[in-house]
Amino acid sequence: MSDLAPAITAWEHTARAVLALGRDCDEADFATATECPGWTVKDLLAHVAGVERWLSPRLAQDPPHDPGDLPHVRNDFARRVEVSVDLRRGVPGPAVVAELAVVLDARCAVLAGASADDVVLGPFGEQRVVDLLAVRTFDVWVHEQDLRRALHRPGGLGSPAAAVAVAYVRAGLGRVVARGAEVESGRTVVFDVRGPVSFTDAVQVSSVDGKGRGTVVEANGRYDVRLTLDTDAFMRRSAGRWPVEDTPAAVDGDAELGRRVLEAMAVTP
């Protein structure tokens, strides 16, 4: 992604969708569990608000905070992410939604004056604004889908943000196959994703300096395993939301290899 305008459009589309879902919540909705371990609907809204606040230098920042020992916090990155959520656990849902509205307006104001190649500090270190927006669009869109599933309000699978989120995951499929699933050199895995955002990628593994490398090649009908999923299943598995056995995927070819690839698809920390 090199053009900032469509990157902003995609991010804002999903962020505003999250805000709209929050505005429609009542007390019971805010307390509803989501597919994110340990997080309710309100917690997800708090997470989005907290991260976007951290990325908004014009706003007051959250104070240092230790969320303590929580069963769903299993690594340092998860502990960092939990801070903004835990700080808002005692805040009423409507107030979290109101904060999110203010934060999004502030972020939009900052982005309006940005250039694609501006370097800023993101969750994973310094990166270009346009690259940070791709990461944020993926994260926020995945959480939009978390909210939609928890609240039984489907939608957003064909949005501009969905296209960016799928592209973000798609760009890493070579590594998923070669490194994550440790697929052997010379073997080919085909991803056939159907639905509002669709594609077919054949990933062929080769050995480079003794390490596996997955390269997208032309799909010519020859493969060791072909995985067919719809857009929703592809992204929910990639976000680690569904265990392999619950993921609606058609596996054609080497079933054991297919399971290894599906296991490795979960790319979120």
Image (tube, grey):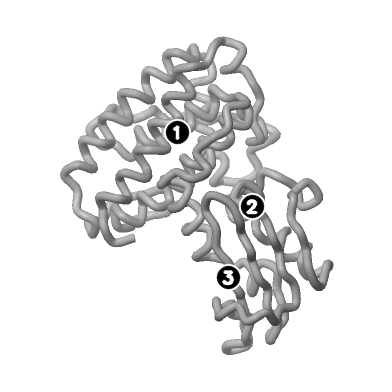
* Residue 43 rendering spot, x and y as whole percentages: 54, 26
- How many numbered circles are shown? 3
Q: Amino acid at mark 3?
A: Asp
Q: Quadrant of the N terminus?
A: bottom left
Q: Amino acid at mark 1?
A: Val
* Residue 18 rendering spot, x and y as whole percentages: 45, 30
Helix, strand or loop at label 1? It is: helix
CB within 8 Å, label 1 to label 2: no
Residue 125 shown left or right of residue 138 in the figure: left
- The label shown at residue 201 is 3
Label 2 environment density (alpha carbons within 10 Å; few <14, some 14–19, many ≥20): some
* Residue 188 rendering spot, x and y as whole percentages: 68, 78
Name the foreground residue: 136 vs 235.
235
Which quadrant holds residue 261? bottom right
* C-alpha span from label 1 to label 2: 26 Å
Which quadrant holds residue 131? bottom left
Which quadrant holds residue 118? bottom left
Label 3 environment density (alpha carbons within 10 Å; few <14, some 14–19, many ≥20): some
Residue 162 shown left or right of residue 223 in the figure: left
At x 16% / y 44%, what residue is drawn?
Answer: 113
* C-alpha span from label 3 to label 2: 14 Å
* C-alpha span from label 1 to label 3: 31 Å
* Residue 217 rendering spot, x and y as whole percentages: 55, 80
Name the residue tied to disc 1: 48
At x 38% / y 31%, what residue is drawn?
Answer: 16
Residue 231 shown left or right of residue 54 in the figure: right
Name the residue tied to disc 2: 230
